[in-house]
Amino acid sequence: MKAVYYQGSGTFTVGRGEILPPGEGEVRLEVAYCGLCGTDLHIAHGSMDDRVRPPQVIGHEMAGTVAETGTGVTGLRPGDKVVVRPLDSRGQTAADKGISHICRNLKFLGIDTPGAFQHSWTVPAFTIHRLPPDTDLKLAALTEPLAVACHDVRRGRVAAGETVVVIGGGPIGVMIALVARSRGAQVIVSEVNASRLAFIRRLGLTVIDPGQADLAQAVEEVTRGAGADVVFEVSGSAGGAMTMTKLAGLRGRIVVVAIFSAPPAVNLFDVFWKELEVLGTRVYEPEDYENAIDFVIGGRLPLADLITSVEPLERLPAALEELERNPSAMKILVDCRA
């Protein structure tokens, strides 16, 4: 069995994986596909060496099947198709107020513990969500990032008839736009990369390049001067942080999705003057995973279009390089079945 190990300092090696029998309350999975994401790139850059313990397998956007279950596990049996919600909140304390998905001692599977870039992966049973037997596991590998988008849209309380602006047309931004559109919102995406602009247009979404057109004016025209009801900042850019309050209308909601490497300048006068809400959002809760699964199996979103390529496990290091240098790449999946 193959596995890819992060060795530290941004290096990876392909080696032999270890099959770990499930203990009490655990399940051993056979990983079919695992997606690459921005977190994996951060790890590849060495930016998360304080959390990852080399040599370690990483990866968390997985779909696969149950291989065997440990004692005390019910409701799962070998052959079941599943996805993993990679959050271990067993370190939660009373001070976390029951908000387990962001508790202070949260462990993220695939970062703080071994991950899914291997064919056999043993995880706590409480992290698993079952899928219908006929689920396409390639599409199911999009569940984790799609759950992020579902959580973001839920935090923003997006409703039918509202105008939503998404700043940043990467994978998460596009998924937020698709989920918001499915709720009946009118969606505008702001993106500067030419290939992403073309891709987003092919999805039938309205997209504006703020380098070529006045984004604020476009939003004013669409909303007849009212401004956006909800703005999602997904770019992580200084420009996006400064623009988000300008685009929002009176009592609009701003959802900060991106992780900023340095504190950005934010126009707090707009927050005061328009009584704006600024909302943080991080990962997901179980209901967001179930909503994402409903999208995967329901066929209401063009999820297959988001899969840029499927690469064999041994090409994972090269696939990470491709994801970084190719801005048009949305989701690259790694086939872990070898």
Image (cartoon, rainbow, N blue to C red):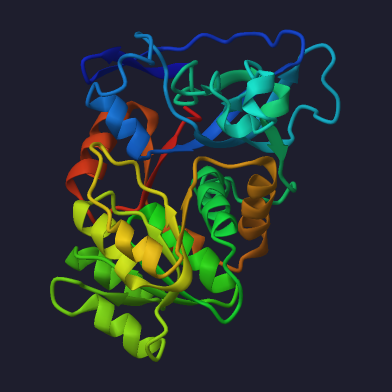
Give the quadrant of residue 328. Answer: bottom left
In the rendered view, tell whether residue 109 sits above or below residue 65: above
Q: Nearer the viewer, residue 139 or 79?
A: 139
Q: Where residue 167 sits: x, y (%)? A: 32, 62
Which of the pair 1/255 is nearer the observer?
255
The answer to whether 331 appears left or right of 292 in the picture is: left
Task: List x then y, in percent, for residue 24.
Answer: 77, 9
The relative height of residue 304 versus residue 314 in the rendered view (above or below) is below
Residue 181's x, y, as percent?
A: 52, 73
Position of residue 323 measured from the top left corner of the image (x, y, whole percent): 26, 43
Instruction: Tell me where residue 100 sits by quadrant.
Output: top right
The residue nearer to you, when weighing 75 against 109, is 109
Q: State the residue at coordinates (53%, 78%).
A: 162
Query: On the rendered structure, is 257 left or right of 27?
Result: left
Q: Is residue 51 visible?
A: yes
Q: Is residue 315 visible in this depiction of the protein?
A: no
Relative to the observer, which residue lies in front, 21 or 249?
A: 249
Q: Is residue 101 left or right of residue 310?
A: right
Number of numbered tags placed on the structure image: 0
Taking 58 as reference, is 231 above or below it? Answer: below
At x 44% / y 28%, what residue is drawn? Answer: 59
Residue at 85% over, 15% down: 72
Residue 288 left/right relative to 195: right
At 64% from the left edge and 22% from the top edge, which residue is drawn? Answer: 95
